[in-house]
Image (cartoon, grey):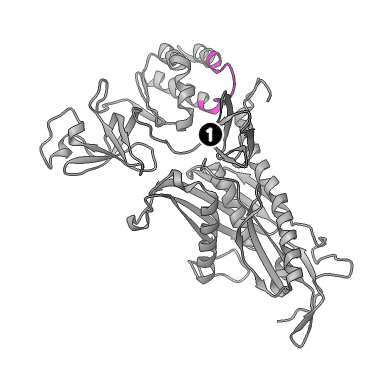
Amino acid sequence: MKSDKKLIDENGKRLDGRGPDQLRNIKIEAGVLHRADGSCYLEWGGNKVIAAVYGPREAIPKHTQNPLKAIVKARYNMAAFSVDDRKRPGPDRRSQEISKVTSEALEKIVLTDQFPRAAIDVNIEVLDAEAGTRCAGLTAAGVALADAGIPMRDIPVACAAGKIGAENNDGMFSGGFVVLDLGKEEDNFGNADLPIAIAPRTNDIILLQMDGHLTFDEFEHALDLAMKGCQEISKLQKEALLRRYKSDVEVEE
Amino acid sequence: MSKSTREIVIPGQLVGDLKDFKPGRGTIVENEKIYSNVLGIRYESPPYINVVPLKGRYDAVMGDLVIGIVEEAMSSSWLVDINAPYPALLHVNEVPWDVEFGETEKFLNTGDSIMAKVLQVNIEKKLQITLKDRNLYKIRGGHIINVEPSKVPRIIGKKGSMIGILKKYTRCRIFVGQNGRIWIDGEDKNVALAQQAIHKIEEESISFGLTNKIEEFLASHGQ
């Protein structure tokens, strides 16, 4: 699987014209669904994600309840029409993995001990996919949780960094650039992808995955880059929440 | 902090220093600093600093008067939805009637509404409610509307000022449950007006001088 296209030129300019440390365009809107307790719609480049939060409510089935704290059940799902070739609908190995890591990341942030025996359901629906959907989903979930009025330590935020453009000489890779927020081609034909999620106030890492190869120095660089990306997105999340509720506050006079 | 509105805070936002305040509701402490843990409004009430949530489920407190809807009648108790994360238990010993074992359905059945009092909340957040008190009974007739539980204090107002105005202008019987359910009974036209007023209160709950505004609204729309 080798592409003829060059993912990045000598000046560090990428296929879609971004620099190495530039994010795609992000649009966040909180409170879009009426029937959910909290919700969020997010566009991140070509990704379109909707997240809905229900609860806290009694955990069912009963054996999943924890008498000391609430459980967070995230469900990541890709719509059949979200990718170019139709995706077979329903949970698969990939979406189950993402649901699991997202649940665990959110459980670290939510103050679960306030709701013993309860479940907080987070449904993440990917309507349009273009690389980096797990980050987009988790970022949307963070806003939706805050919108639902669920007590949290912080608003979780996710972002990825990766490596692209290394030369392949019989399996030995050399060169390449560490860049922020991989696009579609960069994800498919790049060398490595490092999605992370953090609690932006304390910079605590709540999710870290890696696909591909990075040297230790490259890893450190990529992590640093992704952290900065997260901080930037965190600002957008907060703006979206305030925008949604400021209008409730400012009364016509 | 401007005078016209109260400040909205989001989870993880710094709301004060441990040197100046004590952490109140809706806050967490880390490294001597007080942070909000919920989307809400920041209130200073020295020595405490509180964040009152804008949204969220009803957090049951012992002694609260609530409106419940019966979910299920069991042989010696009922399960009642009181808008909390968990259904509340109403035992036959806690109702004013003499109920034979297995005949609970004759008194309260799925879908019936009751005014009840929260009897007990244990550490596991298991809820028990009672009907044994003054003014607690099964609801017959009228309308029930839902509001955010966090807005209930605004609907009641300081010493019942807001609810007093509502009752005076709409000539309805109104009961506000702490869990965000409101029962209204009266003429259809008046009930509709009361509903409008309550939604107005809910939408503008953060502004100052709301009681006067609602009084104007009711005076101009009533009759």
- Where residue A47 appears, as percent x and y from the top left, is 65, 59
Mark 1 crowd level (few <14, some 14–19, many ≥20, 10 Å Cα)? many
Q: Which chain's residue wears label 1? A: B
Instruction: Report whether A123 appears left or right of A240.
Output: left
Does the segment drawn in magenta span residue B211? yes
- Where residue B123 appears, as percent x and y from the top left, is 36, 41
State the residue position of label 1.
B54
Instruction: Report whether B162 appears left or right of A144.
Output: left
Instruction: Report whether B95 appears left or right of A34.
Output: left
Query: As drawn, which residue projects farthest toward the left?
Result: B100
**Quadrant of the frame with the C terminus of chain A:** top right
**What span is colored magenta in the figure?**
B202-213
Residue B120 visible (yes or no):
yes
Q: Name the residue: 50% across, 11% down.
A: B219
State the count of labels. 1
**Quadrant of the frame with the N terminus of chain A:** bottom right
Check the image and report above or below for A160 versus B46.
Answer: below
- Dot 1 falls on a residue whose secondary structure is loop
Q: Name the residue: 56% across, 15% down.
A: B213
Residue B42 sits in which quadrant? top right
Q: Amino acid at mark 1?
A: Leu
